[in-house]
Image: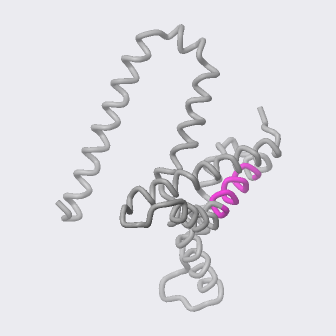
Amino acid sequence: MKINLWHLLGMLIISAIMVLCGNAIIFVRAHPELPAGVGPYLDCFVRGIPGMIILFIFTFAGVICKRHIPLQLPAAAYIVTIGCILSIPGAPGSTGPVSQFMNDLSGTIMKYVGEISFMSLTTPVLAYAGLSLAKDLKILKESGWKLAVVSIFVFIGTYLGSIVIADAVLRMTGQI
């Protein structure tokens, strides 16, 4: 089912506002030395707008690619690919105009997107996941307690697997 582009724009705008609000709250709560009041929240909200616009453009471009490129890839694959390609700096040591442009572009993208907290980006993702789960509530009811048990084992296994991988990488790099 294809979603109407106007509805997509509306959802992206609402998500962007949610992310910017969450970003401001996370930043101000992490810096108790900031003065009390609305000022720090507004400042952080405004500083996050350019990065959010960049992420908004990546997302919208990925959805457009999904619609017009005849490959059976999810929109997320296009979004990540666009973001990665545009964030790669030019070839190290190269002084050509394309390399310089890519250095400037990637630096700008990283600077502005760096203002957005990862945790604030997870809020709309989790909300969307909850809504998509709610539409399959009948199937969830039919699955019953078995699905809950399997889910718990999957979550624990994923968590433990992440711990093992992180520990191995940190030990190989000599950080622990």
- Check if residue 63 falls in the magenta segment: yes
Would you say 66 lies left or right of 173 here? Answer: right
Q: 130 or 162: nearer the eye?
A: 130
Q: 149 or 34: nearer the eye?
A: 34
Magenta stretch, residue numbers: 53-64
Q: 50 or 172: nearer the eye?
A: 50
Question: In the picture shown, does residue 29 fall above or below 114?
Answer: above
The total of numbered circles placed on residues is 0
The x, y position of residue 62, in whole percent, is 69, 53
Residue found at x 53% / y 43% = 123
The x, y position of residue 125, in whole percent, is 56, 41
Residue found at x 52% / y 81% = 91
Question: In the picture shown, does residue 89 fall above or below 53?
Answer: below
| Colouring rule applied to residues | one colour
The x, y position of residue 3, in whole percent, is 78, 38
The x, y position of residue 69, in whole percent, is 76, 50
- Check if residue 80 falls in the magenta segment: no
Image quadrant occupied by the N terminus: top right
Image quadrant occupied by the C terminus: bottom left
Would you say 176 lies left or right of 1 here? Answer: left
Q: 68 or 13: nearer the eye?
A: 13
Residue found at x 65% / y 43% = 74
